[in-house]
Image (cartoon, rainbow, N blue to C red):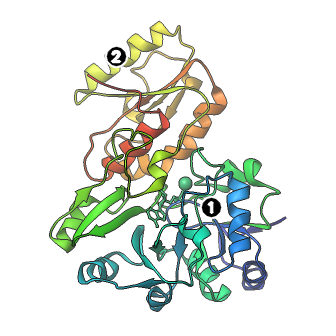
Amino acid sequence: MMYYNWKQTTNTDELKIVCNLIKNGEIVIFPTETVYGIGANAYDEKAIGKIFMAKGRPSDNPVIVHISDKKTISEIAREVTEVEQKLIDAFMPGPFTLILNKTDKIPDIVSGGLPTVAVRMPDNVIARGIITFSGVPIAAPSANISGRPSGTAVEDIRQELEGKVSAIVDGGETQIGLESTVVRVIEEVPHILRPGKITPEEIRDVAGCVKFSNGIFEPVSENEKVESPGVKHKHYAPKTPAELIYSKVDGTLIFELNRMVKYYKGDVVILGFEEHKNNIVVSKHRFISLGSKNNLEEVAKNLYSALRKADELGGQIILIEGVEKRGLGIAIMNRLLRSCGYRYHEF
Ligand code: AMP
Ligand code: MG
């Protein structure tokens, strides 16, 4: 396995090697602005099979196809409607994925047997370079063992994926830290299948309306119909049990957290806001800061690394401070609720 450090600049000789690996049906870890991905040639069934193997990903969970040029959309998708085109114009490139009807060029393994394909155009120099010089769209799910928190830094995922891929491209910490907003337009209405950096408000501004699909803030049952197979699978979960706690009132939140710390006799990890560091009575090394509660961008960026760190510390339980379900807070709460298996208390 090759490791390439492109934290400062992309090395063009190494870029050629990485793109040749993709062309030859190998799988490669690379950064995007959202999280790290494990990518392969989207047209190569065998190569995509290797991704599913490496991740232990259920075969009914389709993967997103990454492009570097909007012209590629007509190659992989058909019947793009007016509303869909507006969304493409507004949010691509960026942390936005659109579900479109697929063409025959996209193998069933990519779409999990669905007649649709998820399309994203990343806005990250390294990702764009790899797609462009590979000359093919790149199918890439998040770089993590299936069910675990996504990887936002190579140090976090190296151990779990090393040896399972042909190369790792290190571009440093990812900028956003949460996966893309996934949208499907149904009867001209954009439905958010997975919230992300692009907020419902932004989508409404472009399309005039927006809806949430089921499974954003509550679990879906086995036989319930969902637009996105991913919402049924366990995800973003640390190995230690976790619980999410929220109150609009800071004092109440701190009081409840301290009560729980006492109940567990301090054998907990707190994932909390920088501002609360000195208010929660727990040993210093058992408090992991998510960043400032007034800077949700920072919280999003830190989230997965913090979850992984908390898991390493272990203890009886990880107690996580929640945020208001508004703007970027929607995506943050969606990921945290799923990490906790929906164990949530609001005071
Ligand atoms: P990940 O690869 O970990 O970023 O997850 C990709 C997400 O996009 C999962 O939740 C998938 O279920 C969803 N997705 C991918 N392709 C489709 C599709 N064709 N239809 C609906 N959801 C999809
Ligand atoms: Mg994932």
Of callouts 1 and 2, the N-terminal one: 1
Residue 212 x %, y %: 27, 54
Residue 114 x %, y %: 48, 67
Q: To which residue does mark 1 refer? A: 172
Crowd around label 1: few <14 · some 14–19 · many ≥20 (10 Å): some
Q: To which residue does mark 2 refer? A: 256
Q: Are marks 1 and 2 in contact (CB under 8 Å)?
A: no
Residue type, mark 2 in image:
Glu
| Residue 284 image label | none
Which quadrant of the view contains residue 18? bottom right
Instruction: Say which residue appears at 53% left-offset and 7% top-offset.
Output: 265
Nearest the eye: 8 or 268: 268
Query: In the image as oriented, which residue stretches furthest toward the front?
Result: 223
**Which mark lies nearer to you, 1 or 2?**
2
Element type at mark 1: loop
Quarter of the figure with the N terminus: bottom right
Nearest the eye: 127 or 52: 52
Residue 1 vs 229, above or below: the answer is: below
Residue type, mark 1 in image:
Gly
Quarter of the figure with the C terminus: top left
Crowd around label 2: few <14 · some 14–19 · many ≥20 (10 Å): some
Which quadrant of the view contains residue 113? bottom right
